Amino acid sequence: MLQKLAASLLLLVTCSSSVTAQSARSNSNPSPPACSARTLHLSDPPYQDYFYSDCHVDAQAVVTSPLPDSNLSIIGPRFIVAWPAGNSGICTFFQPQSGKNGSLAIELVNSTLGAPLGPIYNKTKDSANPVVGVEGVLSFNNSAELPIAILGSVRNIRDFTEGPSLLSPIIQAGIKVTKFQKTGAQISRLWLDNVTTTTFTLVPWKNSDNHIQIDNTTLRFGSGFYHFTASFNYPQLKQLTPSQILNEQSQSLVKQQPETISSLSFFSYTEKLLAGGWRFLTYFGRDSMLTALLLQPVLSTGNGSAIEAVIGAALERVNRTDGSVCHEETIGDYATFVNLQNNITSTAAGFTYPMIDTDYYLPVLMARYFGSSPERISPLLSTKAGSIDIGNLNLTWRDLSYATASKIMNITAAFEQNQTVDNLIALKPDQSVGQWRDSSWGLAHGRIPFDVNCALAPAALYAISSLAAMPGVYPNNSVTQKWTTVAAQRAKVWEDKTLQFFQYSMTAKTAVARLTEYTSKNTFYDGPTNGDSASDYSTNGTIIDYGLAINSTTTPEVIPITHTDTAFRHYLLNTTDDEQLTTFINASANAVLRPFPAGLSTPIGVVVANPALSNNDVLIANFPNSAYHGTVVWSWQLALMAKGFERQLERCHGSSNVTDIPSSITNATATPQFCSNKGVYTALKAAYNKLWDIIENNSEQLESEVWSWTYSGGKNGTEADFKFSPLAVLPPPPGAGSATESDVRQLWSLTFLSVTRNKGFS
Ligand SMILES: *[C@@H]1O[C@H](CO)[C@@H](O)[C@H](O)[C@H]1NC(C)=O
Ligand SMILES: *[C@@H]1O[C@H](CO)[C@@H](O)[C@H](O)[C@H]1NC(C)=O
Ligand SMILES: *[C@@H]1O[C@H](CO)[C@@H](O)[C@H](O)[C@H]1NC(C)=O
Ligand SMILES: *[C@@H]1O[C@H](CO)[C@@H](O)[C@H](O)[C@H]1NC(C)=O
Ligand SMILES: *[C@@H]1O[C@H](CO)[C@@H](O)[C@H](O)[C@H]1NC(C)=O
Ligand SMILES: *[C@@H]1O[C@H](CO)[C@@H](O)[C@H](O)[C@H]1NC(C)=O
Ligand SMILES: *[C@@H]1O[C@H](CO)[C@@H](O)[C@H](O)[C@H]1NC(C)=O
Ligand SMILES: *[C@@H]1O[C@H](CO)[C@@H](O)[C@H](O)[C@H]1NC(C)=O
Ligand SMILES: *[C@@H]1O[C@H](CO)[C@@H](O)[C@H](O)[C@H]1NC(C)=O
Ligand SMILES: *[C@@H]1O[C@H](CO)[C@@H](O)[C@H](O)[C@H]1NC(C)=O
Ligand SMILES: *[C@@H]1O[C@H](CO)[C@@H](O)[C@H](O)[C@H]1NC(C)=O
Ligand SMILES: *[C@@H]1O[C@H](CO)[C@@H](O)[C@H](O)[C@H]1NC(C)=O
């Protein structure tokens, strides 16, 4: 992504990106067969990101170098290389040897070793796995020192960069620093598995006066060029090529959108898709399944396809005991580390299940896929589990998919009988998070989230109903035979009876008073309240809204934060209670039509949460523009909302009869009443187009994970006073050590490949 900057800056602000294919050099002897490389450079100041993939290795390098306007307590010179294999990496921190912070800039430059990255590939007798990695030349404008290096797992690196700078003694104790090639230095670490070694070397390059001094574990060296290598000997994943990821009709995207496809390829492997780089180069259940849903129109199908990699990865990692779908896997060095914390000596991968939403995506995705590829049911579900999660040995993926469906049927049963808050789905008792807003204030400490209850659970029940009717999905027994009807009837109850628990309202007049208060207290926004829009975009003078969550069963207050999770319901369900649907469509369209702070729209994006109408100082303080799930913009939420609005608009035109739901039960094919309510239909269409205008105006950011904005206009300011800002450079939210660094590319932010503007609705 390309952030436009004032022109005066350092040479490393290239404002350009490039995708190149180059032929890989190799250090091995004899040479392996030709192995062409795919590279991508993304400029995201103060970060420069470089991706490198060939037949031996996949790597992302990130160079951070402070800009003249950088906050130097947050941004310092740093060099990371991250590898999907084992979710591994190296992270090195630099500082000026003399002179003040900010006086050291680093840069990765093209050289005969790479442009700028070249491959390391060394097949040696010493190691079962070849030593692979990347090399290149780093340039330092000043004398520098390297006091801290973390080698091993990206999870250990994140514990340091995202936590309160936590270094793990057992990991750091393994660091060995030695002289290398006379003038250089080598930093290496044997993993806790006693087999894998990560190595980083730095040697003066065309810079013969210099040599690196080693002072205990700190390196000191003069300005100039240095040849670096970063390598390890660990089994590699098998990447899917662009043409393997896309279905036949979508192959042209490889040429039309080469950068996006290159990023998608970097995240796509035979065994799983990865959530994002550099921080999440590993399996995340929610991210990959949501992506597969939105990208389904362009993804390949069948054996070895992208969509089966996603479904298979989720099934393989299901908890066989309770059917939970895995949120995140713990692999590589971090797996051995976590086992050791539990007094177990083992390198076995671990699987975590803290989330409550992830389960529901699985049947929805399976129903959509098997609905169009029924011939894949038997081969995919007969796959024997246990190749990744050894705890699932002796089971098939069919058994695991049944366990998840059984869990969902069990957890949703009580609400069908009695529609009380107690019977809604809440976060797990020992967890403080449980759906995609998984930061400490993401749900404002609410326990009963909107998305799971009002969208994901009913959608999953409809999907289980469809799957139960497909031969070969679930084991054929007296329980599953009834699911076709039982699950659909239950889905209807969840669809119709949950929304009311989350609804709250206020008069437009109250809203205006709250906006004045919010704006006067706000530390990052002192612009207009946009109070006029509170009455312009209301329901006859009343603002109707749906809370982010319900606080708890004992204190069942709605948490009055306006949010984008309404999009889940638009995208996943064609609800048929007309009175409820008309109100819901009108309210969620109005929330987008109202400009911030009255609603969700800013010129920089639709924010995922807004506490401005809450009349609650604690909420207002904890949902700022620097909080990970605060008044910030997430690309995939824009995509989900665009698709959700589009699906509802389509219902008014009968332009699609695709449906997962047995229409005998839902009557979902009838045209809903909101279509003939002129005010509501117009609001929906206007919201759809406003959203797309905003998406198009921010196209440079769309493939990144999350971003934010600053405002500098004062009371009489205009839209032009909103400016894009990376999240990580803003002062941290209350209680946080630092704001979160966004991934330059995130899997689910690539979904605009198939989520496109429907001009028919303009
Ligand atoms: C390859 O590895 C061997 C054994 O560790 C080492 O001696 C050799 O220098 C390496 N070759 C290159 C080109 O790095
Ligand atoms: C480095 O090499 C790449 C690939 O050839 C090229 O696209 C890029 O422009 C070069 N960068 C500079 C600063 O010359
Ligand atoms: C690695 O070696 C150490 C020292 O011999 C031993 O204590 C440890 O259990 C070994 N770790 C593994 C995972 O085998
Ligand atoms: C070398 O560094 C280690 C780790 O930072 C430290 O524990 C040790 O005391 C240092 N040794 C000397 C001689 O400074
Ligand atoms: C799987 O679920 C069971 C039952 O809830 C639980 O006891 C177990 O800890 C879970 N496994 C993992 C790896 O979390
Ligand atoms: C691991 O063993 C140590 C020492 O015996 C003990 O203090 C600790 O509680 C154990 N940890 C776990 C998770 O069992
Ligand atoms: C799988 O089956 C084998 C042989 O029946 C048994 O030894 C093993 O414990 C089983 N593994 C699991 C995880 O159930
Ligand atoms: C669901 O409930 C049934 C009946 O109590 C039980 O047999 C089954 O194990 C439960 N399923 C899961 C995945 O917990
Ligand atoms: C539903 O739950 C409420 C609250 O727990 C209880 O008072 C009521 O009797 C229940 N109704 C039925 C039909 O079970
Ligand atoms: C506003 O009130 C009028 C008259 O009662 C009604 O026809 C209209 O549907 C209401 N608007 C909305 C959006 O509910
Ligand atoms: C929210 O619920 C928690 C318990 O989960 C409770 O401590 C807190 O007081 C409740 N907050 C409000 C505003 O009711
Ligand atoms: C809802 O209806 C739209 C338009 O008819 C259709 O594209 C979509 O697939 C339907 N969604 C579901 C979940 O059935």
Image (cartoon, grey):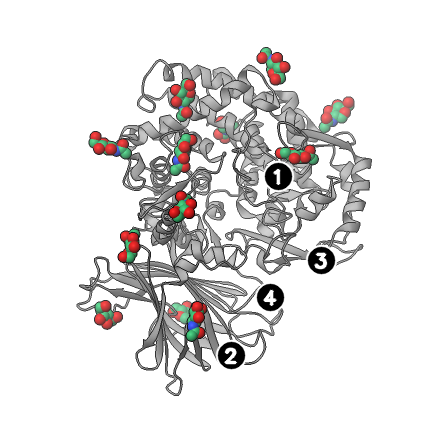
Quadrant of residue 422 within the rendered picture: top right
Say above or below: 238 vs 544: below
Say above or below: 737 vs 98: above
SS under mark 3 = helix
Which residue does the numbered mark 3 point to in the structure image?
Answer: 721
SS under mark 4 = loop
Circle 1 or circle 3, nearest the eye:
1
1 or 2: tag closer to the N-terminus: 2
The answer for how far apart the CA atoms under marks 2 and 4 are is 17 Å
Q: Which amino acid does the dot numbered 1 rest on? A: His
Q: Which mark is residue 666?
A: none
3 or 2: tag closer to the N-terminus: 2
4 or 1: tag closer to the N-terminus: 4
Which residue does the numbered mark 4 point to in the structure image?
Answer: 73
Which residue does the numbered mark 1 point to in the structure image?
Answer: 445
Nearest to the observer: residue 86 or residue 594? 86
| Residue 27 visible in the current orientation | yes
Q: Quadrant of the C terminus?
A: top right
Q: Position of residue 636 (x, y in %)?
A: 52, 44
The answer for how far apart the CA atoms under marks 3 and 4 are is 26 Å
